[in-house]
Image: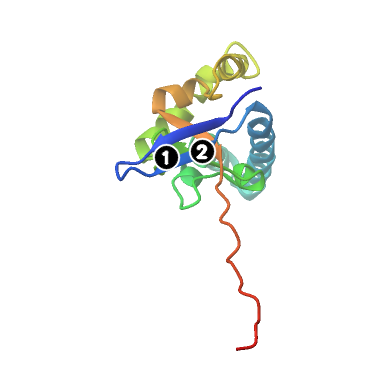
Amino acid sequence: MIDTVHPVQTPEGVDLALRVAGPVPRALAWGVDTLLQGGIALALQIAFAGFAGLGTGLYLIGLFALLWFYPVLFELTRSGATPGKKVFGLTVLMDNGLPVTPGASITRNLLRTADFLPFAYAAGVVCMLVRCDFKRLGDLAAATMVVYRPVAPPPATLAEVAP
């Protein structure tokens, strides 16, 4: 049986148990993000269609920013997740359980191209499958991990009792 719980101890001595996300939910989240990026790219193309050569240049700049900085922008928010990861209840954290830093987010997302090699994210999938914590190459370089977002238990309610 595979144990996907990653224990982390904070400097204050508090033990955290983070559930690491496997390849399937991460691939599904990537698919949602890819569809969303495709829709944004199409909207950019329509918006810049009437500007001829200048529109093509602006579209290519927008496409570059979309492909390279879309995940970084969302991972640095309070939730630490792209819209696809939010749908599946995932978030990106540092190995020590803290929120992802800007440098780590940029590093893990720039190395997405290395994960893609030789084709169809083969290197990233193989790397995830041989490690018990399901880290891809970008996660290893940036010391990050994708985990299930902790869900707070509902507040306790007291029964109505007559005094």
In the image as oriented, which residue stretches furthest toward the front? 163
Q: Quarter holding the C terminus?
A: bottom right
- Residue 31 point in image, percent of width and height: 69, 35
Q: Is residue 22 visible?
A: yes
Side (left or right) of 111 relative to 116: left
Examine the rendered structure and indicate whether residue 127 appears above or below residue 45: above
- Which amino acid does the dot numbered 1 rest on? Gly
Query: What amino acid does circle 2 point to?
Result: Leu
- For residue 147, the mark is none
> 117 or 139, which is in the foreground?
139
Name the residue rendered at 41%, 22% in the picture: 141
Could you tell me which residue is drawn at 58 percent across and 52 percent down? 151
Sequence-first disc among 1 and 2 = 2
Question: Are discs 1 and 2 less than 8 Å apart at CB?
Answer: yes
Crowding around mark 1 (Cα neighbors within 10 Å: few <14, some 14 to 19, many 20+) is some
Q: Quadrant of residue 128?
A: top right
Q: Closer to the camera, 67 or 144?
A: 144
Residue drawn at x 39%, y 33% as measured from the top left: 104
Callout count: 2
Q: Please identify the quarter of the rendering in which residue 66 is found.
A: top right
Instruction: Residue under label 1, please give it.
Output: 97
Residue situated in front as seen by the camera: 147 or 52 = 147
Badge 2 is on which residue?
18
Q: Secondary structure at mark 1?
A: loop
Q: Position of residue 134 (x, y in %)?
A: 56, 24
- Where is residue 30? Give x, y as percent: 64, 34
Res. 105 visible in picture = no
The N terminus, quarter of image = top right
Q: Gap between marks 1 and 2, in whole Å?
A: 8 Å
- Coloration of the structure image: rainbow
Work out which residue is located at the far left of the displayed protein and give it. 11
Mark 2 residue crowding within 10 angstroms, few (<14) / some (14–19) / many (20+): many
